[in-house]
């Protein structure tokens, strides 16, 4: 998996950047909060220094960003960093918590990792806005009214869906994951006007309705 991650996130980014360099096409690249060490309590702005990455996945994504920067002028690319994504396709945190809340009386969720939940539909709309306004370089495209912890997000999901499941806060140490996660990895969105950024709770409600959960 490590080799595959490097091929996709680093070499893949370089290959696409090379094609854009030759064709003159504008490159939009999706990146992650994992390119930062995740130690700033105030969060990260787009122009903050990256690295050291929090884990190997972050290293491959950071390598991909650097490949783009080294191959294209700043006015020919837009690197959009995002985090805590959920959407229609595939597994995601919202679906997982909803399903667990139906199966269990209690669930444990980490309460010491901060970020901003981002609905994929919001991500697309924010990127479209940036492109329409000829934005280039770096941007943070995330939901609004953060940051929160995974524990708080889980509580929001459980309460919004009417479940009686109890959500217990735990630490990252309790979870004992192999790959390290950022503690203060939340991305600050200053590239999009505030009035165009949906509150994460509003987005969550809209998503749950689209999934016929509400």
Image (cartoon, rainbow, N blue to C red):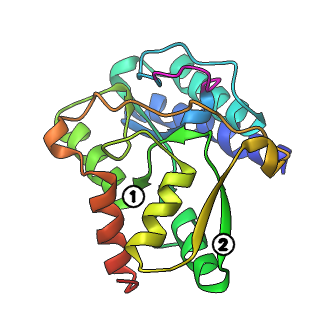
The residue depicted at 41 percent of the width and 78 percent of the height is 161
Quarter of the image where one finds residue 188: top left
Residue 209 visible from this viewpoint: yes
Give the residues in magenta.
Answer: 36-42
- Is residue 37 magenta-colored? yes
The residue lying furthest to the top in this view is: 49
Q: Residues within 10 Å of mark 2 (few under 14, many from 20)?
A: some
Query: Which numbered disc, 1 or 2, marks the residue that appears first in the sequence?
Result: 2
Specify whether 88 is left or right of 95: left
Quarter of the image where one finds residue 157: bottom left
The residue depicted at 54 percent of the width and 76 percent of the height is 98
Residue 130 or 16: which is nearer the viewer?
130
The residue depicted at 61 percent of the width and 21 percent of the height is 39
> Which of the two discs, 1 and 2, sits closer to the camera?
2
Q: Residue tagged by mark 2?
A: 106
- Quick one: quadrant of the C terminus? bottom left
Looking at the picture, how far across and down is residue 160, in whole percent? Answer: 38, 72
Whole-angstrom CA distance, mark 1 to mark 2, is 25 Å
Q: Which mark is residue 21?
A: none
Q: Residue tagged by mark 1?
A: 119
Specify whether 54 is left or right of 91: right
Secondary structure character of the magenta stretch overall: loop
Q: Residues within 10 Å of mark 1 (few under 14, many from 20)?
A: many
Residue 25 or 84: which is nearer the viewer?
84
**Dot 1: element:** strand
Q: Is residue 69 above or below residue 173?
A: above
């Amino acid at each position: 998996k490590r080799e595959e991650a490097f091929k996709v996130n680093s070499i893949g980014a370089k290959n696409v950047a090379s094609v854009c360099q030759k064709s003159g096409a504008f490159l939009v690249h999706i990146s992650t909060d994992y390119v930062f060490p995740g130690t700033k309590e105030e969060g990260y702005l787009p122009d903050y220094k990256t690295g050291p990455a929090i884990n190997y996945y972050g290293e491959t994504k950071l390598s991909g960003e650097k490949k783009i920067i080294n191959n294209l002028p700043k006015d020919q690319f837009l690197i959009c960093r995002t985090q805590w994504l959920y959407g229609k396709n595939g597994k995601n945190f919202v679906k997982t918590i909803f399903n667990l809340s139906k199966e269990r009386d209690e669930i444990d969720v980490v309460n010491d990792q901060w970020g901003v939940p981002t609905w994929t539909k919001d991500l697309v709309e924010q990127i479209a806005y940036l492109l329409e306004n000829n934005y280039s370089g770096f941007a943070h495209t995330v939901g609004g009214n953060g940051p929160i912890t995974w524990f708080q997000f889980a509580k929001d999901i459980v309460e919004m869906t009417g479940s009686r499941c109890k959500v217990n806060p735990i630490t990252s140490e309790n979870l004992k994951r192999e790959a390290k996660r950022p503690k203060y990895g939340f991305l600050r969105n200053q590239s999009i006007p505030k009035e165009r950024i949906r509150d994460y709770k509003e987005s969550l409600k809209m998503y749950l309705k689209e999934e016929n959960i509400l």
